[in-house]
Image (cartoon, rainbow, N blue to C red):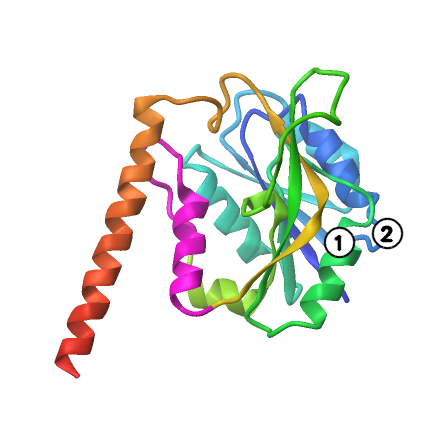
């Protein structure tokens, strides 16, 4: 099975090469890799281009991870798409396992894997918490699912974009399957968008919850009108 990889990147000069190498080193390599550099202020785009001629790098002003990921997905061409954050990386054999499961599943299924967290710069990457992989870095899906769910929304503060998108996928009945093995390493970087608690960034979660309530109310109105 052929597949594309879509990557949104922002100020990821320290990590993007490792991310891309983990993608290129898969036992089933991708047909194409599209990186969207979301207005980085460092050498993210240049480093990504240098990793391999198989990597296509697009640039845009900084608008948010959701916007960048949406553009990356839309720039790919394969029926199957995998996404990964520019500071995480895949373990060998990750895509083979997910492609096999996707092929055996309903064509609207979203396939995930577990991931292990580790702190950037630590030599020990084996003792971090293992979590179900409902994140961008663990996700593989068919293009038709993205077209049905729609673009990834950038909430205020930037957090919660994938929570919103996955909630919309559930609402339209897309099955979720998670491989019960660690296939992804998720990097924890102090100061990154997902690190710690911060009221300004966490405002995104409230926006996501509000959108979910609005969708539920709209569905209830539609049922009453039928």
**Residue that appears at 76% across and 65% down:** 100
**Residue that appears at 82% across and 48% down:** 26
**Residue that appears at 28% across and 53% down:** 212
Residue 164 painted magenta? yes
Q: Are marks 2 and 1 in contact (CB under 8 Å)?
A: yes
Residue 185 found in image quarter: top right
Q: Is residue 190 above or below residue 45?
A: above
Q: Residues within 10 Å of mark 1 (few under 14, many from 20)?
A: many
**Residue that appears at 52% across and 66% down:** 175
Q: Is residue 196 above or below residue 76?
A: above
> Which mark identifies residue 38?
none
Sequence order check: which comes first, mark 2 or mark 1?
Answer: 2
Inter-mark Cα distance, 2 to 1: 8 Å
List the residue tagged with mark 2: 27
Across and down, in percent, residue 226 comes to: 17, 84
Q: Which residues are magenta?
A: 152-173
- Foreground: 74 or 221? 221
* Residue positioned most to the bottom: 226
List the residue tagged with mark 1: 95
């Amino acid at each position: 099975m052929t597949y594309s990889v879509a990557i949104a990147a922002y100020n990821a000069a320290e990590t993007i090469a490792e991310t891309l190498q983990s993608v290129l080193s898969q036992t089933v390599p991708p047909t194409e890799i599209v990186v969207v550099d979301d207005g980085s202020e460092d050498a993210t785009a240049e480093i990504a281009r240098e990793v391999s001629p198989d990597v296509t790098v697009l640039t845009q002003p900084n608008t948010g991870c959701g916007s960048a990921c949406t553009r990356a997905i839309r720039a790919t061409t394969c029926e199957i798409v995998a996404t990964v954050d520019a500071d995480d990386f895949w373990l060998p054999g990750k895509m083979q396992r997910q492609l096999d499961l996707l092929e055996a599943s309903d064509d609207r299924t979203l396939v995930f894997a577990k991931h292990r967290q580790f702190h950037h710069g630590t030599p020990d990457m084996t003792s971090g918490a293992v979590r179900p992989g409902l994140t961008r870095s663990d996700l593989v899906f068919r293009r038709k699912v993205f077209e049905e769910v729609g673009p990834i929304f950038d909430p205020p503060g930037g957090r919660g974009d994938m929570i919103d998108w996955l909630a919309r996928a559930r609402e339209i009945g897309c099955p979720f399957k998670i491989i019960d093995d660690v296939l992804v390493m998720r990097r924890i970087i102090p100061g990154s968008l997902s690190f710690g608690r911060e009221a300004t960034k966490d405002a995104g979660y409230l926006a996501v919850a509000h959108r979910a309530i609005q969708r539920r109310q709209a569905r209830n109105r539609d049922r009453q009108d039928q």
